[in-house]
Image (spheres, rainbow, N blue to C red):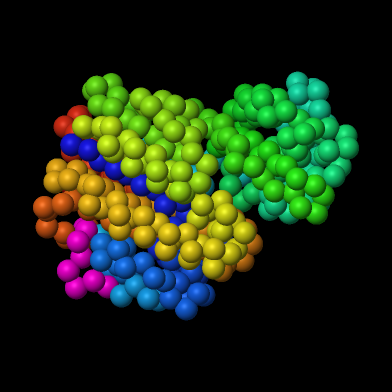
Amino acid sequence: MRVILIVLDSVGAGEAPDAADYGDLDAATLPKTARAVGGLNVPTLQELGLGNITPMLPVGLPITGVAPAESPTASYGAMQEASEGKDTITGHWEIAGLEMIPGFATFPKGPPSFSPEMIGPFEAETGRTAIGNLAVSGTKIIEELGEQQQRDGSLIVYTSGDSVFQIAAHVASVPLEELYEACRIARRLCNSYRVGRVIARPFEGEAGAYRRTRDRRDFSCEAAEPTVLERLSEAGIEVRAVGKIEDIFNRRGISKSNHTGDNAASQAAVETYLEEMKTGLIFANFIDFDMLYGHRRDPEGYARALEQTDRWLTGFLPRIREGDVLMITADHGNDPTFKGTDHTREYVPLLVYCPGREARNLGIRHGFYDIAQTLASLFGIDAMPRGVSFA
């Protein structure tokens, strides 16, 4: 058996019941992106059952251009996050069987966002001054402080609504490996503060035209218990990771990985791994939705990325043979029509394609960890401590 688990990063389905607690009332990534562009053209996802998902939600906004399929080719449902938070780590860890209560620490808008007790040791160990120190869009702070960073060789540090300590530097003034080392230092210092991720944000170009490179790296904290990835690996089942999955799980439970930088490269890596593997799990993150369009509040770009992924799926689905399972979901929302630049607390879609098996309505799943429990059931390993299998 081969299972392909694809996370469409930030492709939420509509506001979660507790969205107001996160300031995210009325956020709905898929429906509002579709509405903003006058409708999505995603015939393969429509055929799988994407349009059947949002009508089952409490606030069931339609996905313009994606009508419910009369006979979906995939089982379909939605998942509500059980953990506290709306960030990448929390979403992926819950998909892999964990629950984060309490969630990771977040920081005030600032400046300063990070306390002197955090910044002082960071500056001392890196030997560089930290500038910025506030919650802000990454592209905006690079635009504002990029010239200063180049002049004095400082490090731009900033956060967001998520539990992140982000570090940006121009590749000409701070070598990439030194930036990664600064992130490792920050990762160690941040452990006692329950910070989910330290993120390297290298950029290049000239003032007025700075651009972030694809050499981003995430330095995650360590999970407190084994995920389904580790359980599978211990049972001798191969687990291959695509995109930032290896960073999110600190390579624990991963047999082989391809740290791709965009959707197209991730899609190609999934195809390659599928051809190479006879059995096992491929766990992939498609990052463009979140990184390029959600945070930048660009619904047109978001829609283009969805339509490109749909075209890829059209060619990919025939490669999936009877006995294989394709799962498509998300880790949180990031409504590109919403206020601010942060993630949004939403239900996420769930599509499960199994050639030769009858599709069914999977309903609303209470906990992303139902995926982990299903993986345990499919591969015949001991049950996970949380979740209900939909196998």
Q: Which quadrant of the view contains residue 126? A: top right
Q: Residue at x 11, y 52 (%)?
A: 356
- Say above or below: 258 vs 284: above
Question: Viewed as shown, does residue 178 lie left or right of 323?
Answer: right
Prevailing secondary structure of the magenta residues? loop
Residue 196 visible somewhere in the drawing:
yes
16 vs 207, nearest the viewer = 207
Question: Viewed as shown, does residue 64 lie left or right of 236?
Answer: right
Residue 53 in percent (x, y) is at: 30, 66
Residue 108 visible somewhere in the drawing:
no
Q: Residue at x 41, y 25 (%)?
A: 252
Q: Which quadrant of the view contains residue 113? A: top right
- Say above or below: 273 vs 22: above
162 vs 1, nearest the viewer = 1
Question: Magenta stretch?
Answer: 68-75
Residue 1 in percent (x, y) is at: 18, 36
Residue 385 in percent (x, y) is at: 28, 35
Q: Residue at x 55, y 58 (%)?
A: 294
Residue 347 in percent (x, y) is at: 39, 59
Q: Residue 167 magenta-drawn?
A: no
211 vs 218, nearest the viewer = 211
How many discs appear?
A: 0
